[in-house]
Image (cartoon, rainbow, N blue to C red):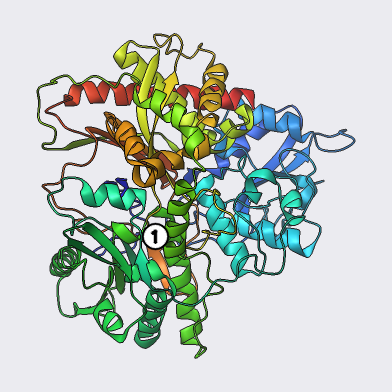
């Protein structure tokens, strides 16, 4: 429940910071594609070393790239075979040749045969005369292009969400780097495009062609208008509000957006108001009385709209002064929430001199948003702004299941005994031996320190795309296999217990659709993982067996862990007591997915770039729920994990050693996956 301690994607800003100017264009031959800096000349040199290649040129072709060139294109190799070659270009052979010389991100996705390279009058390669590659030129050999309108619409949205190009009809969503959070973003985008399905459909129909057979043109759920009324506290909300905290008021998430020009101020305000009206959770109120905490959802009101947007004119300030003013305003926004009055979403618009872009800071209390919610809000803000600029009424599509109805439904589900069969599993797991504390007599809370481990672009690419294919699994299983091994090496035991955070939007209730519902759905549940031979940490280890073993153990977790918190919150008193006695272990793990998989808007949209979180998100006296919190995501093309720890219980040297073992295991898996896909 601590996604707010990590700052996605702020630790590696996307584009210039608030007080920075954009970097000038590079003057050399490097290109940037999906976060990787690539020298086409190096690829050309490697190709020319093949006995099958006479000449070649490598370039980036296709779709509009963003300002940093990270998205929208693909590497294409134009190859002139050696004289006397007959038949088709030996694409698999060329691919294997390059794989032995270059990292995966430098292997072209398409190979186009040419009789000769087109030349300009002065004898240089005429890149403008190179033909566009077709589906039959993909690196894996012929690929089936999407054949129907539905398949083409699905493929387009996959490509946009995943940051890949040339999605074929039989490509697998998870082999392309998809994960459970991105699957919900796909469902939300498809819904806006008029294609309706349940999130679970993407897990049972994992290719474009298969998914096209189950989507419908009619909504599966006809959501009602804005809702109001009492709302049961969900498990994560109840845990947060009843746990000791320095401040329950100051515990937020945020997103800083660089805006395009020209900015229509009135349209922006209209779009923000539409978010508040459409997403009921943003209007929640929380009050504490004799009976404990109460949650209430009021209807939309002009009072909330008047409190939503705060404007700041930074004109005439130096860059340093403007940055300081933004930081001061951000901290005031973070500390200014009133849980009883609302609204629990606030926005600050920073404008100023013509040579400085405008910025919009969105801050929401964690009680009403999570990582998935931000993706929904970001999409809806852009859509609402476009409609408002064009003078159209803002319509954000049909509503999915409200947070109120979900909370009520989950409580009723538990009361009906629907999760009782999960109890033996959870009782066994909470009794597993916890991780050691180096100073068991230390404080339950204290000062928190952090350290970060990071993988390079090549290993990140291998884990996201090669590993799911090589091991027929999902990236979260790979990450947890490496983490479990590192923890087992630390403890010297073959079983380790840790807590996992999940997005919590599981398909457990009938007629419920949460793909476009904003709220705090996070789950936290314990797992106990068996790791044989923890001393074996070298490249020769059987990494496939380790990953498959962890995958099998994770699949045995009932309902992806949702039932643990639901039973502890809504179950009978004896169940709450049994599960509450050891509800939290020493370490919690949270993988937030790919924060930079979506392209930025280089055109006339509202948002030009995302700069991640901004300002002081939580009370500095608040040390968190677990002595060890491991939170990670992919940003800037790199996978990184931040380890939050209490030095009073675990020294920084110890945590660094375990974190390095974790990162090294991930590198070994990446190398093994590249060699065995």
195 to the left or right of 21: right
287 to the left or right of 204: left
Q: Would residue 447 be visible to someone looking at this image?
A: yes
Q: Quadrant of residue 318?
A: bottom left
The residue at 69%/69% (across/down) is 218
Q: Quadrant of residue 632?
A: top left
597 to the left or right of 370: right
The residue at 65%/59% (across/down) is 197
Closer to the camera in the image, 283 or 654 = 283
Relative image position of residue 505 (x, y in whole percent): 48, 51
The residue at 67%/33% (across/down) is 48
Instruction: Classify mark 1: helix, strand or loop.
Output: loop
Relative image position of residue 182 (x, y in whole percent): 52, 51
Closer to the camera in the image, 314 or 295 = 295
Q: Quadrant of residue 588?
A: top left
Figure disc tally: 1
Closer to the camera in the image, 195 or 450 = 195
Relative image position of residue 484 (x, y in whole percent): 40, 23
> Which of the image's four quarters has the N terminus?
top left
Q: Residues within 10 Å of mark 1 (few under 14, many from 20)?
A: many
> Which of the image's four quarters has the C terminus?
top right
Closer to the camera in the image, 587 or 163 = 587
Looking at the image, the residue that sits furthest to the bottom is: 391
In the image, residue 549 above or below residue 363: above
In the image, residue 440 above or below residue 133: above
Relative image position of residue 186 (x, y in whole percent): 58, 57
Q: Which residue is mark 1?
A: 519
98 to the left or right of 71: right
Q: Would residue 113 be visible to someone looking at this image?
A: no
The residue at 39%/8% (across/down) is 535
């Amino acid at each position: 429940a601590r996604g707010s301690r990590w700052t996605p994607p702020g630790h590696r800003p996307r584009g210039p910071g608030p007080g920075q100017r954009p970097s000038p264009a590079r003057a050399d031959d490097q290109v940037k594609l999906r976060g990787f800096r690539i020298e086409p000349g190096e690829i050309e040199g490697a190709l020319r070393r093949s006995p099958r290649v006479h000449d070649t040129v490598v370039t980036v072709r296709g779709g509009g790239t963003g300002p940093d060139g990270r998205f929208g294109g693909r590497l294409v190799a134009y190859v002139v075979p050696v004289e006397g070659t007959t038949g088709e270009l030996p694409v698999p052979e060329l691919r294997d040749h390059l794989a032995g010389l270059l990292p995966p991100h430098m292997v072209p996705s398409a190979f186009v045969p040419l009789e000769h390279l087109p030349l300009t009058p002065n004898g240089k390669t005429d890149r403008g005369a190179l033909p566009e590659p077709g589906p039959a030129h993909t690196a894996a050999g012929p690929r089936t292009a999407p054949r129907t309108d539905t398949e083409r619409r699905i493929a387009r949205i996959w490509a946009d969400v995943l940051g890949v190009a040339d999605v074929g009809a039989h490509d697998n969503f998870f082999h392309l780097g998809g994960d459970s959070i991105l699957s919900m973003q796909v469902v939300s985008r498809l819904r806006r495009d008029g294609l309706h399905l349940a999130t679970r459909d993407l897990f049972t129909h994992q290719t474009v062609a298969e998914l096209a057979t189950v989507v419908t043109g009619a909504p599966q759920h006809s959501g009602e208008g804005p809702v109001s009324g009492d709302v049961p506290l969900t498990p994560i909300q109840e845990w947060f509000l009843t746990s000791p905290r320095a401040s329950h008021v100051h515990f937020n998430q945020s997103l800083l957006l660089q805006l395009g020009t020209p900015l229509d101020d009135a349209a922006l305000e209209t779009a923000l108001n539409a978010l508040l009206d459409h997403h009921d959770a943003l209007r929640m109120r929380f009050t504490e009385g004799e009976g404990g905490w109460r949650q209430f959802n009021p209807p939309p009101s002009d009072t909330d709209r008047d409190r939503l947007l705060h404007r700041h004119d930074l004109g005439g300030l130096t860059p340093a002064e403007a940055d300081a003013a933004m930081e001061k305003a951000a901290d005031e926004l973070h500390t200014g929430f009133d849980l009883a009055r609302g609204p629990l979403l606030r926005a600050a618009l920073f404008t100023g001199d013509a040579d400085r872009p405008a910025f919009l800071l969105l801050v929401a209390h964690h009680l009403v948003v999570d990582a998935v919610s931000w993706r929904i809000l970001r999409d809806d803000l852009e859509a609402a702004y476009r409609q408002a600029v064009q003078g159209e009424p803002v319509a954000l599509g049909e509503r999915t299941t409200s947070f109120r109805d979900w909370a009520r439904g989950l409580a009723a589900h538990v009361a009906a005994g629907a999760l009782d069969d999960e109890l033996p599993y959870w009782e066994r797991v909470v009794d597993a031996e916890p991780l050691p504390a180096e100073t068991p007599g230390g404080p339950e809370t204290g000062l928190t320190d952090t350290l970060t481990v990071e993988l390079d672009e090549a290993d990140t690419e291998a884990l996201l795309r090669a590993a799911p294919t090589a091991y027929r699994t999902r990236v979260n299983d790979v990450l947890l296999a490496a983490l479990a091994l590192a923890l087992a090496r630390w403890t010297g035991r073959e079983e380790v217990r840790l807590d996992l955070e999940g997005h919590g939007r599981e398909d457990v209730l009938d007629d419920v659709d949460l793909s476009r519902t904003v709220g705090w759905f996070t789950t936290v549940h314990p797992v106990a993982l068996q790791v044989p031979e923890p001393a074996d940490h070298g490249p020769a280890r059987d990494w496939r067996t380790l990953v498959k073993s962890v995958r099998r153990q994770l699949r045995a977790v009932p309902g992806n862990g949702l039932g643990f918190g639901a039973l502890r919150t809504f179950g009978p008193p004896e169940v709450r007591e049994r599960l509450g006695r050891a509800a939290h272990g020493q370490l919690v793990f949270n993988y937030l997915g790919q924060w930079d998989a979506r392209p930025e808007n280089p055109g006339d949209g509202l948002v030009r770039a995302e700069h991640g979180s901004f300002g002081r998100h939580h009370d500095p006296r608040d040390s968190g729920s677990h002595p060890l919190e491991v939170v990670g995501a992919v940003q800037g093309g790199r996978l990184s994990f931040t380890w939050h720890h209490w030095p009073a219980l675990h020294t920084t040297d110890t945590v660094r050693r375990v974190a390095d073992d974790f990162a090294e295991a991930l590198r070994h898996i990446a190398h093994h996956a590249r060699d065995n896909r």
